[in-house]
Structures are given as C-alpha cells and as structure tokens.
Amino acid sequence: MMRLRIGFVLIAMVLSFFGARLVQLQGIDPESYAVRAAAEGAVRIPLPAERGDILDRNGIPLADSIKGTMVIADPVLTADRAPEIARLLSERLSVDYFRTLTALRGRKEGSRYEYVARRVPSTLASDTLAELEEAGYEGISLEDDPIRDYPADDVAANLVGYMGTDEPLGGFERTFDKQLAGVDGEATWQSNSGKGVRIPLQESTLTAAKDGAPLRTTIDRDLQWFTQKVLAEAVQQYRAESGAAVVMDTRTGEILALADVPTFDANEPAEVADEGDLGARSMSETYEPGSVAKVLTAAALIDAGKAFPRQRFRVPPNLARQDRVIGDWFDHGTIRLTLAGIIAQSSNIGTVLAADAFTPVQLVDYLQRFGLGQRTDIGVRGETPGILTPGEAMTSQTKDRVAFGQSLSVNVAQMAAAVNTIANGGVRVSPSLIAGSAVTDDGVTVGTDVATRTRVVSKRAARATAKMMEKVVDPEDGVAPGAQVPGYLVAGKTGTAQRVAPDGTGYDGSTSVSFGGFAPADDPRFTVYVVVHAPRVDGGGGSITGPVFSRIMGYVLGRYGVEPTNGKPSRLPVEW
Amino acid sequence: MSSPALQPRARVTRIAQEAVDRARLTVVPRVRTRAPRVPFVTLVSLVLVGGIVGLLLFNTSMQQASFAASSLEAQADALAAREQTLRMELDELRNPQRVAEEAQRMGMVIPAAPVFLDLETGRTSGVRTPATREDALHLLPPDPIMPAVLAPKPTVVEVPATTPATDDASAAGTGTSRKNRDR
C-alpha cells in the first residue's frame, strides 16, 4: 500500500512538472516559440520574375534575359585555401585572379559575404561549384542573379537602352520598365537539414512570380544593323561629329530603323567613350533641317493654290530682305527657274520668293500640321519638341528663313514623318516605334495602336511635290544624283543647314547635311531620312548623305521585295 | 394483464396446485459462453501494427517522393538554364555583325540595288548592277586614336658633331653613342 502511494506521488510530481512546462510554453509568450519553431528548418526561396524580352518586328530579341547566378564566398571558410580556389575560379569564370583572391580572404575583417562574380550563366556556375565541391573546397555558394543580354551588341542600343547592376538605366529598358520587370514571387516550405528537400505535409506557400511582358518594337534588326553600318561609314569618312538615319514604312508610319552614330555596345555600357552616346541623340538634340524643309513649303503652297510646279520665277543673284541678304549656295546671275527647278537646284531665294504668297501664320500652320514643333511621342526618352515660332509672333524675316529650313529646329523622327506625309499622298501618319501599344513611365500610351492619320495637304499637292522631288536626283537638273537607286524612281530632297553653336550664340560655321526621300516615287513604300552633323570634309546633302540614302533605300527595297515600278520619270521643266 | 386472462389461471391453480407449485419459475443461470480472446487481440494488434507500419511506409515513400521531386526540380532548373544559355549562344551566332563578317570573308557583298527574277516568265526586273569590292561595308570600327598621353612626341636631343670629319660613318656613330653614355 505504501509503495503504491509513493508511486502516485512520484507520478503526480512528474505530471505537475509537465503542467508547469505547458503553462510556460503556452501561457507565457507562445508566439515567439511558434516563430522559432517555424524558422528552424523553414526555407524561403525568392522566385525572381523573368524580365520581358525586347523584340524586333519579327520576334528576334534585341534584349533577352537568361538565368544567371552570382558566386558568393564566405571568407571564414575560404580564406585558408584562397589561392587554390581563386585559381580555379579565375580559370573557369574568367574573373581576375587577384580580385578573386581578395574576395576569398575577405575585403573586411569578419566579413562572411563577398561577391566573387556576378551575372555568370548558371550552367557554368553550377558546373564550377560541382568541381569545387569535388575537390573538397568549401565556402562558395550561388544565388540567383538574372543576366540581361543584348545578342546584337550595338544594334538599336540607343533605343533599347541598357541595364545597370540592378535597375534599368536608359532607353526602352527604363521607359517601359513597369511592363518588362514583372513581379517577383516567393516560395516557403519546411525543410530538413537545410538541403532544400521539402518535408511533406508541412505548411508551404507559393506565390508564383509574374514574368515581365515582352515589348515588341517595329524595328527590323537586320535593317537596323545595315543602317547603322552605312551611316557609321559616312560619319567616319567625312569625319563628322554624329549622324542619324530613319527608315519608315510609308503607309503605316512604322519606323523600321532609327540609327544613331556614334553608338555603344549595350552589353558594355561602361566602356562608352562619351556618355552622350548612351541616349538617342537623333531624338533628344535638335538641329535646323535646312533645305529638306523646302518641300514642305512647296507642298503647302501648292495645296493652298498659291503655286504650281511649272510656275516661273526669276531668281536674282541675291535677295535683300530687311535685316540681311539672302543668298544661294551656288553663285549665279539672274536665272529663270520653275518651282520644280527651285526645288531641284535647292534655291533659297526662289523658295523665299514663292513663299511670299504666305503670311507667317499660314506657313506655320502648315508646318505644324506636318508635325514640326511637337513631340512625336514614339517612346524615346528625352525627346525634344524642336522649336517652331508661333505664326503670330513670327517676323517676316524669320518666315523667310523658316521657308527654306533655317530658324526652326527639329528632331529626325519629326522630319522623317513630315517627308513621309508627302510620300503618303498628303496624309501624315504619326510615326511609331512600338508594335501594338505600351505605356511609358510618363503615362503616355505609345505604339502603332494609337497612331493617327491626318490630312495635311491634298493628294494632288503631294503628287506634284513628289514629281518635283524626283528632279532632285536627276543627274542633269538636280543636285543629288548620288541618291539614285538603280532601277527605281526616287524622290528626295537635300539639305545643308548651318548649325547653331552649342552655347546658342549663333551659327558656328559647321553644317548639318541631310537627305530625305522615298521610293518608288510613283508608289512610295519607304521613306528614308539621313542627317550627318558637322562633317569636317567639304560636302553637302547631295554628296554626303545622298549615297547613304541610296544604299539604305536599295537594301530596304530588296529586303521587302519591292519591285521597280517601271514608271515614267518626272518631265517637269526646271528652267524656262 | 387484462382481466379475462385471470380466469384460466385461477382454474389451473385449483386443478393442479401442487404441480404448479413444483413448476414455479426460477431464474435460469446465465450461460456465459466465453468467446476465445486470442483472435480478437490478434486482429486488433494486426490492425494497429498494420496501420502504424502502413503510416510509416506511407511517410517514407512521401519522403522518398519529396527527395525525388527536389532532385528532379534541380535537374529541371539546370536543364532550363542550359537551354537558355544555348539559346543565348544561338542569338549571338545570329548577330548580323558576325554573319556579315563571315559572309564578307567568303567574298560576298550586299548589292547596291536588288534585281528580281520572275520564276514563271524567267525575266528579270531591275537594273543589274555589279556588286563590287567597293560595295563591301567597313564592318569593323576604326582603330581608336591613341591618346596623347600614351604617344608622347619623341624627345630629340641634338648632339653637336665633335667627331673629326675624317672618320668614317660607322666610327662616327659609335663615337657619338659613347659620348652620350658618358654624359
């Protein structure tokens, strides 16, 4: 009996211990214990969202993302055998041996986390890690670090932009980051021994990553490459400061190529010589278009019924207007030119005389409808609207200069779209660079879906202007025979404009030479506009940019299978 | 009991009271058939053991599956990464610059204008312009100009001619260099 009692007492004591412990665990601060229990063996894996690709019009990537890895060292474990590990890592991952050695030994006292290499293709990294483990080295681990790759290096780099270490730094990458970035996900589960093996039937959560949506552009990668090469060659040959070229689909306004020279390798943005090359100068810097704008004036005059192609003008050697004398690029006595001849010979005086039929308000109104003075909103960062003085504030002297393309400034997309208006029968299609639609970081919706069409001049006026522009490339009557494309009827216009000094103190003596045109002239399919800034070798729009135009146009016509139309060339008289 | 039933009972009592007394009902002792315990215990233990073993096996197999899933996942990840790397390599190979360099090395150039061949009529349209070496593009960027820091102007030190004019050229040369060294 006694024994039984002692037994009961013992059991009661043990049970009361258990009870006390229960109260301690459950009654006093149960939360912290639960958290500790969950943390023990809980695995949290971030699931990085894959960044959307930037594609060309045919779906070829201009920028794509691949799984990448960062290689991380724990110096506490690696310091002792640093030289051996560093040798292996530097051989396999092509990283600098001495920098790796420093990382493995720890850049700071007591550091346990050092980057050895970033953006390593994960296959290479995991192979290397396996090799290290086999050799018995410890302390190297891998973490996700997606790689952004630009397979064609510098092709369309000025538009596409580039990535910094963690964030987009320019171009479409930055403008459309919201769409491209996606949303990272996360998975948590209970694991044993930290090897990432899930304990079944335990609590686990999964928030799937939402990958970024791809961005489709209207760029044609091969054409963009060709345009860049031909333009770069001209810029180099004429020792020019920079250059830009646009290829546009006449009917849809889609920009097939928008080249900037100098450019940079999007995979190595840090190696660029001048930081200004990282953006799109073609869109962010303005220049005076020069004589290419004469075709806009002429088309407007014909549309308003104030001129016609065969209209006769008596062009004096120079023309005294209020504040200064207007001259032509070539010396001549009094010559007798038709309006077509004024365009073909690119006579400033003739254009001013013809434009006398317009008031400043009328001229500016037309130019505005051609799209000058307003942003094109094609989705390029930092686009300038250019400068076009409002008609009410414009003096007649300024109007004279605006008529032949000085005292107003533009960007290349504006100018290409304006020339394209004449190609497209007088209807201006707003240019676009994004296929479909996308929203910029400023909240503007851009793309082909929101492209607009507005009639600027009548079809008759546009056709008449195109006929006059054919004369520009005529070997006998025109100034730019070099712009011809063998077998095709080409219409175009040269431009040689004085450049305003960077400090804005007036013209500095350098020029911007350009050529804008379209082909086939009687059924236009493509508009090409080329501009070269500050060439140091003497030349004008016809001799420098004409051949560039010709090569690009010849290539794009062949590439898109546009057969020669075998139309009759323009037979407008240039003189009378 | 209802009253008509009392009637026969009274009569019977009267007739054979003794027999009735003798035949008085007594409580029959309950027959306790002791079911054999062994099969039941065996059954229960079997169910219990079976359940536990089953649960254990089930758990083990789930663990196995979990290990297999993890390793397969890792394998899938590695394969996906390899696919992406290969796709990147393919894209690099498709780089128009590389293709153009290769083509140019093989003697191909991009013509100035296209010519079309109609397969039905066999006629061509367009002007046939020969593609010449001049049409070839400069594919590589020009060599960068060496900065002035790295290409200093040669330092020219004029040495007065002190050697006798009678000496031949080679002797004069060695003489000068020796003199230079002496300074």
Image (cartoon, coloured by chain):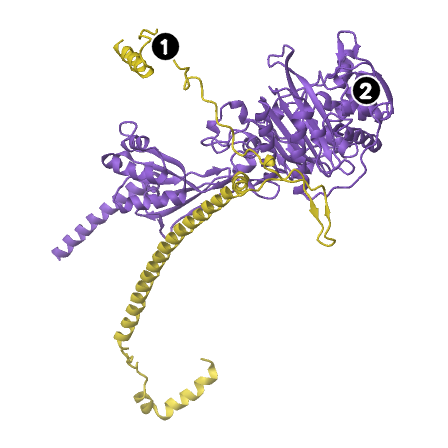
Residue A99 seen from this side: yes
Question: Which chain does the residue under circle 2 lie in?
Answer: A
In the rendered image, the residue lying farthest to the front is B166
Can you tell which quarter of the image residue B55 is in?
Answer: bottom left
* Rendered residue at 54%/34% (across/down): B139
Which mark is drawn over residue B117? Answer: none
Question: Which chain does the residue under circle 1 lie in?
Answer: B
In the image, residue A286 lies at what x, y percent? 64, 21
Of the pair A493 and A206, the residue shown nearer to us: A493
Disc 2 target residue:
A362
Mark 2 is surrounded, within 10 Å at the Cα level, by few (under 14), some (14 to 19) or many (20 or more) other residues, namely some
Amino acid bearing label 2: Gln
Quadrant assignment for the C terminus of chain B: top left
In the image, residue B159 lies at what x, y percent? 35, 8
Vertically, is A480 above or below A28? above
Under circle 2, the secondary element is: helix
In the image, residue B135 lies at what x, y percent? 61, 36
What hue does chain A carry in this figure?
purple
Amino acid bearing label 1: Val
Of the pair B8 and A548, the residue shown nearer to us: A548
User: What's the distance in space between the residues labelled 2 and 1, CA to CA?
Assistant: 72 Å
Of the pair A542 and A285, the residue shown nearer to us: A542
> Is residue A66 left or right of A326 when viewed as pictured?
left
What hue does chain B carry in this figure?
yellow
* Rendered residue at 79%/37% (across/down): A522
Disc 1 target residue:
B157
> Is residue A91 left or right of A507 when viewed as pictured?
left
In the image, residue A115 lies at what x, y percent? 35, 33
CB contact under 8 Å: marks 2 and 1: no
